[in-house]
Amino acid sequence: MRYKTPTIDNKPHWVPIVAKNKDYLIGYLTSLQLFTDIISDILESNNINIDLRAIDLCLDSSRFNDIMENDKREGDCSETELLDYYKQMIKNKISLIEDDHPENDTEFFLEVECPCEFGIYIFKEETDIPDKTLTCSNCGRTIIDYTEHFDTEYEFDGTRKEINLGGNDEID
């Protein structure tokens, strides 16, 4: 079976969080938090200061298809476009890790941002997470998609391209 990608104007779009249901999402997030707490303690005990809040949840829809966050299909992009896309994604992650803004110290269970950049959804506790699929109130995109299926039930729908970094490319 293939993941039924949500659409806007009949065009499929990338979804930040796809999970079987709320219980699976909460279980995943709880185990991820335990893992990051353990890693943070190990890093701290070795005097390594890395903020793991920006760690990617790996729950987005790209695990089922090749639709990237910019809504383009990886299979339709040139190697140069993909390289630029992934460089920018890494820059953004590094920026999140380095951003020491006081507002980032707020404790919450889950934060998810819509790619439209106008919808930021913060759930302070497990109970705040909706039971049903969540769409952005600004643009209508699906933000959290509950499929009622296990990930293993899906076949990958798309094309993965290998990117040749040439060994010397750096992130500017």
Image (cartoon, rainbow, N blue to C red):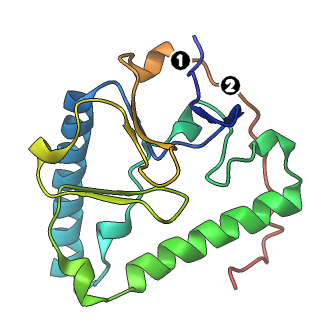
The x and y percentages for residue 86 are 68, 63
Q: Quadrant of the C terminus?
A: bottom right
- Name the secondary structure under disc 2: loop
Q: Is residue 147 left or right of residue 132?
A: right
User: Please, what is the three-letter code of the amino acid marked with disc 2?
Assistant: Asp
Instruction: Give the residue displayed 24% in from the left and 46% down from the top.
Output: 29
Please rate how many residues cluster around mark 1, counting C-alpha atoms within 10 Å: few if below 14, some from 14 to 19, many from 20.
Answer: some
Residue that label 1 marks: 154
**Which residue corresponds to the image point at 86% horizontal and 56% vertical from the top-left?**
79
Report the residue at 79% width, 55% height from top: 163
Task: Describe the element under mark 1 as helix, strand or loop.
Answer: loop
Which residue is more in the foreground, 113 or 89? 113
Relative to 145, residue 117 above or below:
below
Q: Residues within 10 Å of mark 2 (few under 14, many from 20)?
A: some
- Please tell me the numbered disc located at residue 157: 2
- Seen at 78% across and 48% down, the residue is 162
Vertical placement of residue 172 versus 1, above or below: below
Which residue occupies the foreground of this view, 124 or 24?
124
**Residue 148 coordinates in the image, percent (x, y):** 35, 17
The vertical placement of 76 against 5, above or below, is below
